[in-house]
Amino acid sequence: MTPHQVLNQVFGYQHFRPLQNDIVDAVIAGEHVLALMPTGGGKSLCYQVPALIRSGCGVVVSPLIALMQDQVETLKGLGVRAAFLNSTIEYAAVMETEQALQRGELDLLYIAPERLLQSRTLELLQQVPVALFAIDEAHCVSQWGHDFRADYLRLEVLATLFPHVPRIALTATADPSTRQEIIDRLHLGDGHQFVSSFDRPNIVYNIIEKKDARKQLHGFIRRSYLGSSGIVYCASRKRVDETAAWLSDHGINALPYHAGMSTDERQKNQRRFLEEDGLVMVATIAFGMGIDKPDVRFVAHLDMPKSIESYYQETGRAGRDGLPSEAWMVYGFQDVAWIRQRLMESEANDAFKRVEWRRLNAMLGLCEVSSCRRNVILDYFGEVVTEPCGRCDNCLSPPETWDGTQAAQMALSAVYRTGQSFGANYVIDVLIGKVTDRVVQYDHHLLPTFGVGVELSVLDWRSVLRQLVAKGVLRVDMNAHGALKLTEDSRAVLRGEVTVALRRDRELAEGSRARKPSSRLVETPAAVSPQDKTLWDALKALRKSLADAKKVPAFVVFNDRALLAMCRERPVTVAQFMAIDGVGPKKCDEYSAVFIDEIGRHSQG
């Protein structure tokens, strides 16, 4: 079959997305490929289609156990012969899968890197035809990346043992230096690089200053996403447990997930999240990689991520179905201090710490920017866009700015006169004239800058200092317990040679400001027309009953986009049902009768 025939007859799609066809053709031709595509951009098809066309079994290397299980369930539902090997399956199942591989009965085999690299597994693969190697989450190979995994470094053995088997490395997050490291370490040589746009146009970015994080989160969910699936990220296990319990006590169906829980608890909560509608998962970043749930409507952060790479990857778990979703975050200067402390306490070398510190500063800059946030994200990944997106909070509700030159001069003077040896809270005490034991101990109550900033509140000064750090006018010295230091740019500000425009913090009591405008982007389940609402609910109920009977997540039957198309098109024949995007022959054979019958009942009269 041709790639388009496989796409249509197996996966039920009419057309490839941008770059997919080119990537598929290159892999089928036996070429090595590096593919960068956003989460939800269709990376899986880039190796699944070639694996079904090339001779042998496609081997997919992934560190994500949850993704393996979901992908295999979905593929089996499409009639594809797929299996996985990882630490969750027992010996008998391992033997059964290996024997199926030897008999040529597998089209795709998902495997964890540590399992692949066992000498026994490598010897087995050398005895069977291998169609391709797909290295998913390829950024894990980068020692400078945000999610380095040592096992990935050893994947270079594939180039030695299988020199003629095409290798496709896939990731959603890699800056230019990380891309080169992937190419070098996986020996992709002169293989093709396909870099899709990093833009996720269906996601609205919404970042506000932290005041009372849990109450802000609760208001955000209650107003915009009650009854929707979402993920809430917290920086610590304790904060995860407390937030999940608090949300549950306040009417939000929430579950916790972190590495401190037992394996059974984590798997149970993860399965519920995949299979049930309207659950909110509160988690550390241990949750989410490889979660193939397409209808996550929001991703919220109660603590600032350590880098734009982390933020982009985590927010990319929202709206994988392409429908409008939101990335919402509250942040504060205390987040910077917490990440800095973790970095200082790590055993990483100084070079790595300097790289991580630059990434943290870039993340803070994203939070403090008054212009389009999407453009900042895209620019970070080397994608230059000049026009504002019109779909982030700063575009939808432009922040007010003010001339903060005098405030900046006060802050810089206070930092200088206190010896550049203290953190933000101490400097603020001096600025507002707060007499504390430490201030008196160092005689800083006698400084001319003591109390000069009394007209601004503590929250105002925190905002000023955050923005000065983000602008590079101040820096936080991670080698001096978070002390604020002047920079080369400080002198021009102190001399009045430049004007410092600062963003005025928004009203913090209200959570999301961007949700209402964002609902205009494309049709969403929440915007189903009144005449279609009853049918929509009926199709969701039918889908759930079919999924429950098979013990699979509902999206394995059909995703929300397919159901929306059924509501719109109301197919009454098998041919019309088959024309729905996402309906392939196997799903048509299996489900067309019951869905057409349900649609017919709601279309009479």
Image (spheres, rainbow, N blue to C red):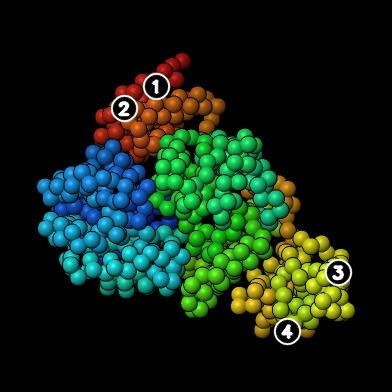
Looking at the image, residue 373 lies above or below residue 238: below
Residue neighbourhood size for the residue with mark 3, other residues' Cα within 10 Å, grouped as few (<14), some (14–19), many (≥20): some
Residue neighbourhood size for the residue with mark 4, other residues' Cα within 10 Å, grouped as few (<14), some (14–19), many (≥20): some
* Residue receiving disc 1: 598
Residue 238 in the image, given as x and y percentages of width and height: 58, 51
Question: At numbered mark 1, what does the secondary structure look like: helix, strand or loop?
Answer: helix
Residue 295 in the image, given as x and y percentages of width and height: 46, 41
Query: Distance of mark 4 from mark 3, alpha carbons?
Result: 28 Å
Mark 2 touching mark 4, by CB under 8 A? Answer: no
* Residue receiving disc 4: 491
In this image, 591 relative to 450: left or right? Answer: left
Query: Distance of mark 1 from mark 4, alpha carbons?
Result: 72 Å
N-terminal of the pair, mark 2 or mark 3, is 3
What residue is drawn where x is 39% and y is 69%? 142
Looking at the rendered structure, the kind of residue marked 4 is Arg
* Residue receiving disc 2: 592
Mark 3 or 1, which is nearer the eye? 3
In this image, 73 relative to 148: left or right? Answer: left
Residue 236 in the image, given as x and y percentages of width and height: 56, 55
* Residue receiving disc 3: 435
What residue is drawn where x is 59% and y is 59%? 304
